[in-house]
Amino acid sequence: MLIGLALAGLLPATVALAAPPLASELVKASLYAESDTVAAGQTLWVDVHLAVAPGWHVYWKNPGDSGLPTEINWTLPGGFSAGPIVWPMPERFQVGPIANYGYAGDVDLLVPISAPAGLDPAASARLGATVKYLVCEEICIPGEAKLAFDLPPGAGTPDPAQAARFAAARARLPVAAPFAAHFIVESHDLRLLVPASALAGINRPAANFFPDADNVIDHSAEPRVEQRADGLALVLPKSANPSAVVPAALDGVLVLRGANGAPRGYQISAALAPASTGDAGLMGWWQALAFAFLGGLVLNLMPCVFPILSLKVLGFAGADPAKRHHHGIAYAFGVVLSFAALGGALIALRAGGSAVGWGFQLQSPLVVGLLAYLMLAMGLSLSGVAEFGVGLAGLGGRLGGREGLAGAFFTGVLATVVATPCTAPFMGAALGAALVAPAGLALAIFVALGAGLAAPLLAASFVPGIGRLLPRPGGWMATLKQVLAFPLYGTVAWLIWVLIQEVGANEALMPLFGLVLVGFAVWVYGRTRFAAPMARRAGAALGIASAAGALVLTAMLSPATARAVPTGGGLAYETFTPARLAALNAEHRPVFVNLTAAWCLTCIVNERATLDRDAVRAAFAAHHVVALKGDWTRQDPDIAGFLQSFGRSGVPLYLLYDKGGVATVLPQILTEAEVIDAVDKL
């Protein structure tokens, strides 16, 4: 318009001749090498530095709604080759109704240059680059810069003068995400789920996502951050383009920023999660409570709980109805309050940003060791080495009073503790909802779990028909009590095996000696309990010293740091990592994911009874399924975050990904036919 007015003679010539600025005035390009010499076979890093004028910007590899990415065309000596640009974290620029991705200010584009193995040791190498860019404000101006430098031959050591430049450039690069992100497809949005483990140390997090591919999201629509108990959800409106398709994986750069501090950039490949597992709001509160109660009921059938309940039922035999009622109520209180305390602990850790889940206390070697000592002491009591009484399955009577009510209460506490290695059917959905629900509803879910676990024994203490099924007291009770010691010894063996998985075989020697000390303490107590006062005091002192020694040995334990590639289960497993899963999905390969733990009895049974079968192995081989195993025996925030992204708080979790990267969640209790049928559908 200005040009038209000038031609009409209505504007001064100075205005008519005004022209947009030159691209070379808006972008100053430079080329730097990290080393001051080049060596044969070396990978040399170079930095194409762009200094962009204030108010203007250049573009990222995906420019957004408009623009062109910066290109670098290399002129290199024979045998040299240039790798792709390593792009730093981009910014988002909103200009009216469109949004772009790019850079303002100083931009460093790092590129690896490979020197040939047969490099002439006497000749310098001339490296040339033609940089083509588009620089924009309200108008866009294409530009080009030709850059070159000569590098003499040498050792190829880093140039100290360039160390700060390249360190600053690398600090702005996104890193491979150490966590698993997932996304859910909704009617108008893609909901990117980021686990809490990614937000550690970030207050009031903000987030932005830059997709590698165009035509996936609506670039102009401002993304929305929703805080969740298990992390955050970044709501990305879908692309309005009719040809847009939902990708199998959402690839790109996730940038997280807190109220203070530098942004964190992560290169992610978020897998598509089933919509039914991604949002706790999809499960109504009454459904979550019902599933929790049913899951608690089924826990009574699990081998984790059997030894404890057997002892309590034994205590009901021959007892008068009033005593049974009181003991049933006390036991129920112990279970429900313990579940409430466990739920409160999980909620508190969740609020603090920790990635924890069901059974988290058994990831502590100290807790596992103490449970092994307790089970051994209870078993020795039942075997007659020392009579502690049957309250608290051996310890409750010592907590005493009120005709063993404290013992019944603490039996409920212990039943809760030993129940956590099991994730019964129905519990997975309920616990997953608890991890993302508001604190009040989450606590109610844990109380419902406790109510389900306590219900059968409470019913047995009140319903006359059930009470009449209990036999009358007699000599058989002493024999049965001794027989029931052996499930406890079996539990001790299993706990020590778990401990070996957590700390390693060498470290496990200390708790094995601790078991000897506990056995000695129980024997001393039994031998001196009814002795003369002096001998009783000496025995008590010796027993306390032995038990204290066992505690010290256990307190010295620390988790092993090395993780071997998981084996067993009949399948040739690779170690699960979110990055490995993303790579296999990108290669369009079917994948089976087995998230397990040594303390998860359901996991062990599934592997032995189902996955370790010739027919299952043959089906996996026929369909070229890659098997990944994630070991959650010890704490692993990546696995915890991955579990939470599927609405789960504990193991087992079994996923079968098809070639498109879409996951099918398999049941928690597997059958051979179900696994083979799911694989055949691939």
Image (cartoon, rainbow, N blue to C red):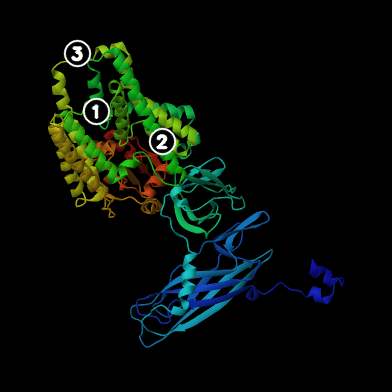
Instruction: Say what secondary structure mark 1 lies in.
Output: helix
Q: Position of residue 459 (x, y in %)?
A: 33, 18
Q: In this view, does 240 lie to the left or right of 282?
A: right
Instruction: Say what secondary structure mark 2 lies in.
Output: helix
Q: Position of residue 49 (x, y in %)?
A: 54, 73
Q: Which of marks 2 and 1 is in front?
A: 1
The mark nearer the N terminus, 3 or 2, is: 2
The three-letter amino acid code for the residue at tag 3 is Arg
Label of residue 343 in the image: 2
User: Is residue 237 visible in this depiction of the protein?
Assistant: no
Q: Name the residue: 25% across, 18% down.
A: 316
User: What residue is pinned by disc 1?
Assistant: 393
Q: Position of residue 151 (x, y in %)?
A: 44, 83
The N terminus sits in image quarter: bottom right
Q: Distance between the residues labelled 2 and 1?
A: 24 Å
Q: How far apart are marks 3 and 2 (CA)?
A: 39 Å
Q: Is residue 317 above or below residue 631?
A: above
User: Which one is nearer the viewer's eye here, 297 or 540?
Assistant: 540
